[in-house]
Image (spheres, rainbow, N blue to C red):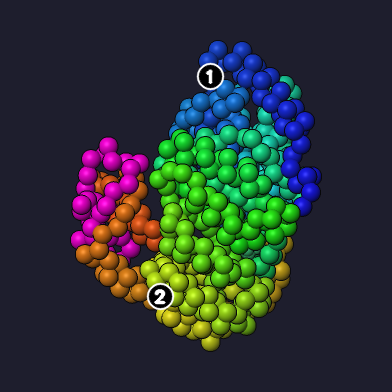
Amino acid sequence: MNDDVFVSAEELDRQKNFEEKDKKILFGRLRRAPKAYVHTFGCQGNVSDGERIKGELSLMGYEFTDKPDDADFVLYNTCAVREHAEDRVFGNVGALKPIKEKNKSMIIAVCGCMAQQKNIADVFKKSYPYVNLVFGTFASYRLPENIYKILTTGKRVFDTVEEPGRIAEGIPAVRDNGARAWLPIMYGCNNFCTYCIVPYVRGRERSRKPEDILAEAKKLISEGAKDITLLGQNVNSYGLNADYGVDFPDLLRMINDLPGDFIIRFMTSHPKDLTNKLIDTIAESEKCVHHIHLPVQSGSDRILKLMNRHYTRERYLEIVDYAREKIPDVSLTSDIIVGFPGETRKDFEDTLSLVEKVKYTSLFTFIYSPRPGTLAAKMDDPTPSAEKSKWFKELCDLQSDIASQRTAAMVGKTYRVLVEKGDEEGYLMGRTGGNVAINFKGDDSLVGEFAYVKVTKALTWIVYGEKV
Ligand code: SAH
Ligand code: SF4
Ligand code: F3S
């Protein structure tokens, strides 16, 4: 991998210059700090992008609000992975129309994976005239320049040019949660699973330099991060297209060796590139949680082939066996697509039997959603959607049974968790290494600290416990 994978220092300086200019214009016009509302949809990778976009905005002088009505700049950072995700964005952007009518100088922007698709950018151009700015995933680092164009010309800006994708280093992240942090180690995807839009909207795989990742990890730790998730669409191919001489297990070990009391998670691990070396490294790295998110997508070899996943059911189960041998308490989670084009009842039953065999801690299940431009969207899809919904429910029911058994087995055991504010009134929450949430009572001052919690009661997905 050569240096043109990185946005040049000159270009980043140029954007810094626009940041200064934007700040002057905005403070001059408003006579106060401008306010931004940023909402991110989609995966953790997108959440991490959103944090960096907020970083750019804060350098332009923006402060943040959680109400779009209060904002001078509203940004939706979007996801295109399923149709439902896109529908939600159109709904949210549509709801801004009356707000913009009251506040004409408000800048409305859409970015992220939807925005990167030309056909979708065109929908915003034609049908949402009050949207001022649409920029794709490749253009995030050009936000200062794009805002400058809007501030100085009043014209709408569409920056959705397709590029191989580059890495912009040095943009700070504005993070909402001090203790939990996302750390991107790579961007893009080369795998072209036939159902998936991600490679089209995120470009080719590119790995950050180990020294940049380590420097950011150190910074996060010094800021109080205690739970760091390494992010990539396929972390197992980290470094493979670069000449860093560092692969993902090496990187994991380097981060594990940094001083400090923190835990390391990572996602997502593509089974085709998962090595025994990785499993050994997890087993030997005391800060790495015993959890592997290992999306299988289907238990049928025929469907795996049509999906272009490059592994078989047998190989997948071999990985599971090796992981369970080396890390006896390993927690496995997965993503599964139900109703891929041409999937038969027999194929689906192969998925059920695989789920039964692996006994996942939890599953993310999705009904196949055709994505225009992908290969699968052109495949014959004769199975009626009512049938797919029935299968989907069957899979969810099976997983509920398995999850209940797993959570019931946690009762009486004690786990070390990082304390977070709970979703449930009156409770704090802590996630086990295996990513199961435990609700327990305790003082708010514990938030952001590690605590030992003994499980006292288990429901299907959540368990309750007491601090010990
Ligand atoms: N890079 C990750 C997944 C990213 S997308 C991996 O390879 O595992 C997250 C999940 O969304 C996928 O694992 C898949 O299960 C699901 N997904 C992606 N495209 C989809 C589609 N067109 N329809 C339904 N689910 C989809
Ligand atoms: Fe999509 Fe496959 Fe890449 Fe994951 S590995 S992002 S599912 S193309
Ligand atoms: Fe993530 Fe959705 Fe884009 S899953 S990479 S935000 S399409």
Residue at figure coordinates x 48%, y 27% from the top left: 70
Task: Name the quadrant containing residue 136.
Answer: top right
- The residue that appears at 57% across and 44% down in the rendered structure is 214
Is 327 colored magenta in this rendering? no
Camera-side mark, 1 or 2:
2
- Secondary element under disc 1, as helix, strand or loop, is loop
Quadrant in the picture for residue 213? top right
Question: Which residue is farthest bottom?
Answer: 346
In this orientation, which residue lies closer to the viewer: 214 or 59? 214
- Upstream in sequence: badge 1 or badge 2: 1
Q: Is residue 61 visible?
A: yes
Measured as percent of width and height from the top left, residue 382 is found at 62, 79
The amino acid marked with disc number 2 is Lys
Residue 444 on the magenta segment: yes
- Using residue 283 as the reference point, say whether residue 133 is left or right of it: right
Residue that carries the numbered disc 1 in the rendered image: 33
- At 47% from the left edge and 52% from the top edge, which residue is drawn? 264
User: Residue beneath label 2, please?
Assistant: 359
Q: 10 Å neighbourhood of mark 2: few (<14), some, or many (≥20)?
A: some
Q: Are marks 1 and 2 in contact (CB under 8 Å)?
A: no
- 443 to the left or right of 264: left
Q: Which mark is residue 185?
A: none
Mark 1 to mark 2 CA distance (whole Å): 52 Å
- Crowd rating for badge 1 (residues with CA inside 10 Å; few <14, some 14–19, many 20+): some
Magenta-tinted stretch: 439-468
- Provide residue 247's location: percent of width, then percent of height: 63, 58
Left or right of 325? Residue 4 is right
